[in-house]
Image (spheres, grey):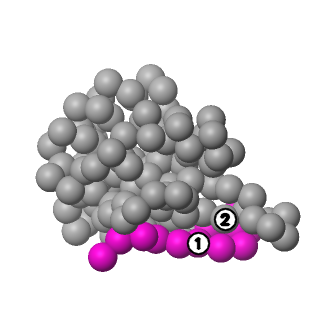
Amino acid sequence: MLNVQEFKPENADEYNNALKGFSDASIYHTRPWANLLQATLAVKPKTLIAFDGKDIVGILPLGEQKDLLGGHRLVSLPFSHLVPPLGNKDAINTLLQYTLNHFRDKNYSFLEFKYD
């Protein structure tokens, strides 16, 4: 069974190494991109990581931002082109299901996935 966790700074090296193994990874999956969105556009990074034991098998970068009506939106990723989840089918399904549950639990006003 896969375990999903939010990105933690202490996982940065492991995260960066895992990104190299995903052929669909782009600049939008990197931590510098998430940090740029946070610093310049007030987007709070919510990158989700699927673990199989200690191995990273899936990644879904999300960003939380305030909407115009005072609620919060969860987007993969705001102000970015297509940002697909990374991983095999099981990892992607686990990440998407986790996101949907989190969306309901946190009462976000909007959820958007941007990928083909």
Q: Is residue 8 left or right of residue 90?
A: right
Q: Nearer the viewer, residue 1 or 20?
A: 20
Contact between marks 2 and 1 (CB within 8 A): the answer is yes
Quickly name the residue at label 2: 73
Task: Tell me what residue is drawn at x 54 percent, y 59 percent.
Answer: 78
The location of residue 30, given as percent across then percent down, is 37, 40
Asked whether residue 64 is drawn in magenta, I would say no
> Which picture quadrant has residue 102?
bottom right
Residue extending farthest to the right is 70
| Disc on res. 63 | none
Give the amino acid at mark 1. Leu
Q: Is residue 63 left or right of residue 25?
A: right
Q: Is residue 76 left or right of residue 89?
A: right
| Disc on res. 111 | 1
Please report the bounds of the magenta region as a residue range. 102-116
Give the amino acid at mark 2. Arg
Above or below residue 57? Residue 113 is below
The location of residue 103, given as percent across then percent down, is 62, 67
